[in-house]
Amino acid sequence: MAAFAPAFLADIEEIHREHESLLNDLMQFERALDSIDCYSEVLVNLVAVGEVAFLTRRLVYQLLRHFTREEETVLAPLAEISPELGDLVEKLRREHGELNGRLATFAVGVEELESADDLYDAIWQMKEQGKGLTCAIIQHVAREERELAEWM
Ligand SMILES: [Fe+2]
Ligand SMILES: [Fe+2]
């Protein structure tokens, strides 16, 4: 392993802590999705829907902030080390864009849920999309953790 400046290693530590915090928040988000009971158009747990909406807004902010910080403090310096790492960083940046885009679309869907023509169907779709998104973010973070472990 190459010797890195202490400041760079501290930035990697910080990103690792943000990953742990993000994973905790994703678990809470998933639990909120699971707690939405939807037996019919008129039997929807609106408190749970409200919690999903709140957690979604928080996640939009958190993810955008994390990705920006990660790109500036860790990914940009890593990309300078070798062409292979440059490729990896490019891939991770692309995933940031995709995940931000998916989350933004999801967030719009959650905000517009109440005006859906078929609330029952819209809620089931929201649950499925939310779980798929959670899975994709967890996979992205797990990959970064594997890569970052190489530099610690
Ligand atoms: Fe990332
Ligand atoms: Fe990350």
Image: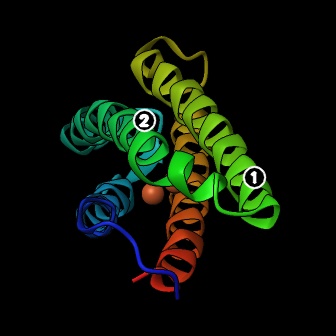
Query: Which residue lies at the image location 46% right of the left edge and 84% below the top edge?
Result: 149
* 83 or 150: nearer the viewer: 83
Q: Secondary structure at mark 2?
A: helix
The amino acid marked with disc number 2 is Thr
Kindly identify which residue carries mark 2: 68
The amino acid marked with disc number 1 is Lys
Query: Which residue lies at the image location 47% right of the left edge and 42% below the top edge?
Result: 40
Q: Position of residue 89 (x, y in %)?
A: 67, 53
Residue 40 visible in the picture? yes
Kindly identify which residue carries mark 1: 91
- Whether the residue under disc 1 has CB within 8 Å of ligand 1: no
- Compared to residue 6, the image places residue 68 above or below, namely above
Q: Secondary structure at mark 1?
A: helix
Q: Position of residue 66 (x, y in %)?
A: 36, 44
Query: Which residue lies at the image location 60% right of the left edge and 25% below the top edge?
Result: 118
Say whether residue 71 is left or right of residue 20: right
Say whether residue 14 is left or right of residue 119: left
Q: Position of residue 51 (x, y in %)?
A: 21, 41
* 95 or 119: nearer the viewer: 95
Give me the C-alpha separation between circle 2 and circle 1.
Answer: 15 Å
Query: Which residue lies at the image location 24% right of the left edge and 45% below the top edge?
Result: 48
Say whether residue 56 is left or right of residue 89: left
* 25 or 74: nearer the viewer: 74
* 22 or 49: nearer the viewer: 22
Q: Which of the two labelled residues, at mark 2 and mark 1, occupies the earlier sequence position?
A: 2
Residue 130 visible in the picture? no
Q: Give me the disc on residue 28.
A: none
Q: Position of residue 112 (x, y in %)?
A: 46, 15
